[in-house]
Image: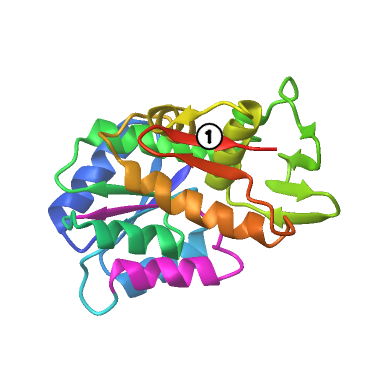
Amino acid sequence: MNKILVIDDDLSINELIKVNLELAGYKVIQAFDGVKGFALCKQELPSVVVLDVMMPEVDGFTVAQRIRKNDETKNIPIIMLTALSQLNDKVNGFNIGVDDYLVKPFEMEELIIRIRALLKRSHQIPESASTRDLLSLGDITLMPETYCVKIKDKQAKLTPIEFDIFNLLFQNHGNMVSSAQLLKEVWGYSPDDDIETIRVHIRHLRAKLDKISDGKKYIETIYGGGYKLVL
């Protein structure tokens, strides 16, 4: 049974999440502050962390940073919950390494869908990188077992989301992949016009590719449309 760690100082929200996740078949661990939350994350090694931003003493951004810096917890998927809808808060979360972002108030079914999508991504080789798909073309080789991309003799380790983005572009090389398609196929759901989510991950992906591509730019932005992989 997958364990979900919920870190939220709001007792009513924490309990509501717990009840709904247990009904969905998950084991739920609760923490009501950031210090205890990080301690439980190291102790329990949950499958997913559901993390609130606005908490006393240690906020969610700090907890997320600590999770990502710890060798035992750095790969645990994080969904950040917040009442803050400003763009900068979302960008800060993704820059830290948060996998998903849900603004309060939210529907419990939406939270469960996103948890399922993260569990699927973290526990399996990505569906989009199955053996029936192209794994090598030109100078590029994909290694789905390790979430790595190799260009000539250099390779970069990607996050699961970055790998899914790159693989979707790779399988459609030469053709534009729309932002809507990226949101649907990579995240597994269709948030409303959440373009900044894509931009942040594309920026991180480009930075990693730049280190191994000898100056070649592989991802082209099609303004107003989406992105295209150029080989």
Q: According to the image, what is the colour scheme of the structure?
A: rainbow
The magenta segment is 59-82
Tell me residue 79's x, y (percent).
Answer: 37, 50
63 in magenta = yes
**Secondary structure beneath disc 1?**
helix
Q: What's the residue type where badge 1 is placed?
A: Lys
- Nearest the viewer among 100 and 142 is 142
- Nearest the viewer among 177 and 84 is 177
Tell me residue 193's x, y (percent).
Answer: 27, 36
In-image side of 55 versus 187 (left or right): left
113 in magenta = no
Tag 1 residue: 120
- The image shows residue 205, relative to residue 89, as above or below, that is above
Res. 62 image quadrant: bottom left
- The image shows residue 12, relative to residue 38, as above or below, that is above
Residue at x 17%, y 50% (from the top left corner): 13
- The image shows residue 189, relative to residue 10, as above or below, that is above
Tell me residue 85's x, y (percent).
Answer: 18, 54
Which quadrant is home to the C terminus?
A: top right
Residue 123 appears anywhere in the view? yes
Tell me residue 47's x, y (percent).
Answer: 49, 48
Label 1 CA crowd tier, 10 Å (few <14, some 14–19, many 20+): some
Residue furthest out toward the bottom: 57
